[in-house]
């Protein structure tokens, strides 16, 4: 099969490495507008055919039905190459966040549907991992009783993309290029995980907020206008059953950093570390008035890393196999969660996303 990578930076290279773990040989093409980055990519992957122009790459040969184009540019440059790739009749796997805003995201899905192509989002990087599947299995077994509360907090003290992490990519800090801060960066994984586990037909965003704690090393020589700490109080509905969700995500906080993912039900609870698959999953329940804590069996670790997963899931979907990919409407729904959170934080007005009618209501 043929894989076209647009954006030869840090994450584009992880997709190229993932391609060599697919079950069939891959022919690699790559486009980057930066000639130096392109040259260093082609040095690392000498079999790749390089282009500095995206259209030239897409027009260089007729599309085949299982061609996949990966968009691994900064969010500002997701929309145009996605549309060009879909119009070239190829499937598109786009990096997270899917787009800069909801209207772009909707148009991307519409164009994909019009061309009967799949469009997926790399926000599924952690989906399908054994510890996540173990959480779902316990939850679906009913042994936790009625689920009434979920805590989903990932607060890191100093982990800002563009400062502490990958400081060479300052675009993460500039909302005109990134579309937003930590919510656009990590929120796609958070909501993909929450939605996968809780399987909602509707989410009500009751309240939300965002903040940007200052540090003495905040860059002054380039734009830095994005949030680094967000939170929301939501109700997930699975049918008519409400589950209250406390959500937080920080890449910078002066509070003590902590990670807590816990599902509480009337018969038990489940606690895990969503973004560290090496950590155990615990189930707690009552025996004769005492808490019992047991480690949940999660099975062997996957042969694929979080960097392999987006392409591997999407490839399976393109081939018509069972897959953890989120494509078309599902990709849009996850993106809508980010936009609703921003909107509620900005306006103070609650919002609902109704997954059955695909609509957002205020
Ligand atoms: N870095 C990570 O760890 C990481 C992890 C997961 C997802 N992502 C996502 O991957 C995407 C890219 O991030 P990155 O860290 O690889 O960025 P990067 O800055 O390392 O690389 C981006 C590349 O895109 C190229 N580019 C920009 N506009 C282009 C265009 N119009 N056409 C062709 N090439 C263009 C740039 O020249 C650059 O080489 C982002 O959406 C990011 O959120 C990054």
Image (cartoon, helix red, strand yellow):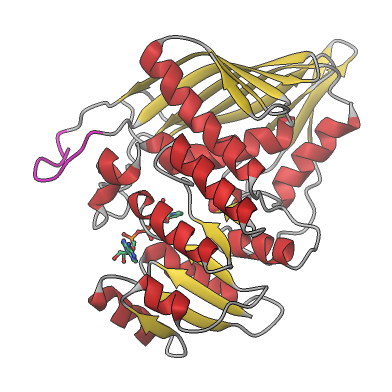
Q: Is residue 233 magenta?
A: no
Report ligand 1 position as a quadrant: bottom left
Q: Please provide percent x and percent y for residue 226.
A: 28, 34
Above or below: residue 298 compared with residue 291: below
**x, y percent for residue 172:** 30, 46
Query: Vertical placement of 160 versus 12: above or below?
Result: above
Asked if residue 128 shows in the view, the reply is yes
Q: Is residue 292 visible to us here?
A: no
Q: Nearer the viewer, residue 251 or 321?
A: 321
Asked if residue 222 lies in the magenta stretch, the reply is yes
| Main secondary-structure element of the magenta-colored stretch | loop
Q: Where is residue 37? Give x, y as percent.
A: 28, 74
- Which residue does the image show at 39% across and 72% down from the upper left? 55
Say which quarter of the image contains residue 183.
top left
Rendered position, 192 above or below 17? above
The mark tally for this picture is: 0
Q: Position of residue 286 (x, y in %)?
A: 85, 17
242 left or right, relative to 143: left
The residue located at (39%, 42%) in the rendering is 100
From the image, which quarter does the N terminus lie in? bottom right
Q: In terms of image quadrants, where is residue 78?
A: bottom left
For the record, the magenta segment spans 216-225
Q: Is residue 44 above or below residue 194?
A: below
Task: Kindly identify the residue that appears in the image at 26 percent across and 41 percent down.
Answer: 176
Residue at the bottom extreme, as displayed = 47
State left or right for residue 80 relative to residue 168: right
* Residue that extends furthest to the left in the rendered view of this protein: 221
Residue at (25, 77) in percent of width and height: 35
């Amino acid at each position: 099969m043929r894989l076209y990578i647009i954006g030869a930076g840090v994450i584009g290279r992880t997709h190229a490495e993932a391609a060599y773990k697919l079950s069939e040989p891959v022919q690699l093409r790559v486009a980057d507008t930066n000639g130096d980055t392109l040259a260093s990519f082609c040095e690392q992957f000498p079999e790749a055919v390089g282009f500095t122009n995206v259209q030239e790459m897409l027009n260089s040969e007729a599309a085949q039905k299982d061609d996949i184009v990966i968009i691994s540019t900064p969010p500002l440059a997701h929309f145009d190459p996605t549309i060009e790739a879909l119009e070239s009749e190829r499937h598109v796997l786009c990096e997270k966040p899917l787009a800069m805003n909801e209207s772009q995201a909707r148009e991307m899905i519409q164009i994909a549907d019009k061309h009967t192509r799949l469009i997926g989002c790399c926000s599924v990087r952690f989906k399908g991992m054994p510890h996540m599947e173990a959480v779902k299995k316990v939850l679906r077994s009913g042994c936790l009783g009625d689920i009434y509360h979920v805590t989903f907090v990932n607060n890191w003290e100093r982990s800002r993309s563009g400062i502490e992490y990958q400081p060479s990519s300052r675009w993460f800090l500039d909302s005109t290029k990134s579309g937003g801060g930590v919510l656009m960066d990590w929120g796609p994984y958070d909501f993909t995980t929450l939605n996968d586990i809780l399987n909602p037909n509707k989410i009500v965003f009751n309240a939300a907020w965002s903040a940007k704690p200052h540090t003495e090393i905040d860059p002054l020589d380039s734009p830095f206008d994005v949030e680094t700490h967000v939170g929301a109080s939501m109700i997930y509905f699975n049918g008519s059953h409400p589950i209250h969700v406390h959500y937080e995500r920080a890449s910078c906080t002066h509070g003590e950093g902590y990670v807590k993912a816990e599902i509480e039900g009337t018969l038990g609870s489940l606690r895990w570390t969503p973004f560290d698959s090496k950590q155990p999953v615990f189930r707690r329940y009552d025996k004769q008035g005492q808490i019992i804590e047991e480690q949940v069996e999660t099975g062997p670790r996957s042969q694929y890393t979080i960097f392999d997963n987006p392409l591997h899931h999407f490839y399976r979907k393109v081939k018509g196999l069972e897959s953890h990919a989120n494509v078309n409407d599902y990709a849009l729904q996850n993106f809508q969660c980010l936009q609703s959170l921003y909107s509620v934080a900005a306006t103070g007005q609650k919002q609902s996303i109704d997954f059955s009618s695909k609509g957002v209501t205020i």
